Amino acid sequence: MRPLRFVFACLWFLAAISSASPGGRAFGFGVDEYTCSFLGGAVINVDQEEAAKAATLPAIRTVSAEWNVPWMKIPGGTDLSDPDNQHSLAQWVGILGNACDDKSWYPFLQAGTAIGVNEYGTTTAYAWVEWFPAESHSIPQENVTVGPGDQVRVTIDVYTRITGHVSIQNLNTGREYAADVKADSPEDPRFHICLGYGTAQFFQEWVIANDRAGLPVFNNVTFTNVAALDRRGKYFDLGMGTQDYWNMTAADKDVAIPEDIDEKSFVIYSPEGRAWSPARYDT
């Protein structure tokens, strides 16, 4: 969802710490917490199995979660006619691995929802999919629509280095987008998800708004039924001891803070929006 120069500021570090020890996570005991200027959420680190190494496959095969699509509001006095002030937040799950030929490059498959505030102050939403390093692709509304307040379930699979599957289901409407996907440039090795410890990602991302003086406020986003499967079908969740949490912080101000609920769930909240319960008419 972001230009490369911003993505690697946090994702390179995320991948580096996940492979910093034989256990597939940073050295130390207990759950670690990190900060990023545009990502907030949780990850599950998964060891690379020998069979997957031999087949040059990513450690993780499947990642899934459910969440509520949030509302968003912008601080009063913000000029929303200026595109630089039109904030956008994305909620997504992803599978991160190393490139086959370059262990310092980290392609990934991700899919989810995104919300924005238009020039009239209305929260809008859509579903999308991305095989990084390509840009994201919006899912046509004739396939599935999402809106603030909807509950969605997203599942992604990585079958081979360049192929996978994405399912985005709106649990309110019952409509689902399900399709096989392929790396945008399958001949380009930068797109090949290959060796290395795998990282299952469950994030909210601050996508755009060049003017970051006015922080976006959103109602709580609760991720539930958080799960990952490795190549053998072994199950992982947030209670396995390999999870990390990421706070989204900009200019020393908290933007999005994750807080664990149980082994399958966590919530992401903004400090000013934690107690906000918007009604449908707020959009």
Image (spheres, rainbow, N blue to C red):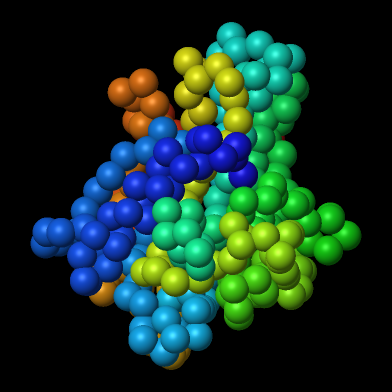
Estimate the x, y position of residue 235 in percent, counting from the top left. 38, 83
Going 27% across and 68% down the picture, which residue do you hit?
24
Asked whether 83 or 197 is in front, the reply is: 197
Going 78% across and 56% down the picture, which residue do you hit?
139
Going 83% across and 63% down the picture, which residue do you hit?
143
Q: Decide if residue 236 is on the left or right side of residue 155.
A: left
Residue 141 visible somewhere in the drawing: yes
Q: Decide if residue 169 is on the left or right side of residue 158.
A: right
Residue 65 visible somewhere in the drawing: no
Above or below residue 160? Residue 90 is above
Q: Which image quadrant: the C terminus?
A: top right
Going 59% across and 25% down the picture, which residue do you hit?
209
Asked whether 189 or 110 is in front, the reply is: 189
> How many callouts does the rendering have?
0
Q: Which image quadrant: the N terminus?
A: top right
Above or below residue 129? Residue 62 is below
Estimate the x, y position of residue 99 in percent, counting from the top left. 51, 63
Asked whether 258 or 130 is in front, the reply is: 130
Estimate the x, y position of residue 233 in percent, counting from the top left. 44, 89
Q: Residue furthest front?
A: 101
Estimate the x, y position of residue 186 in percent, counting from the top left. 71, 66
Asked whether 229 or 85 is in front, the reply is: 229
Above or below residue 134? Residue 175 is below
Q: Decide if residue 219 is on the left or right side of residue 171.
A: left
Q: Residue furthest left?
A: 29
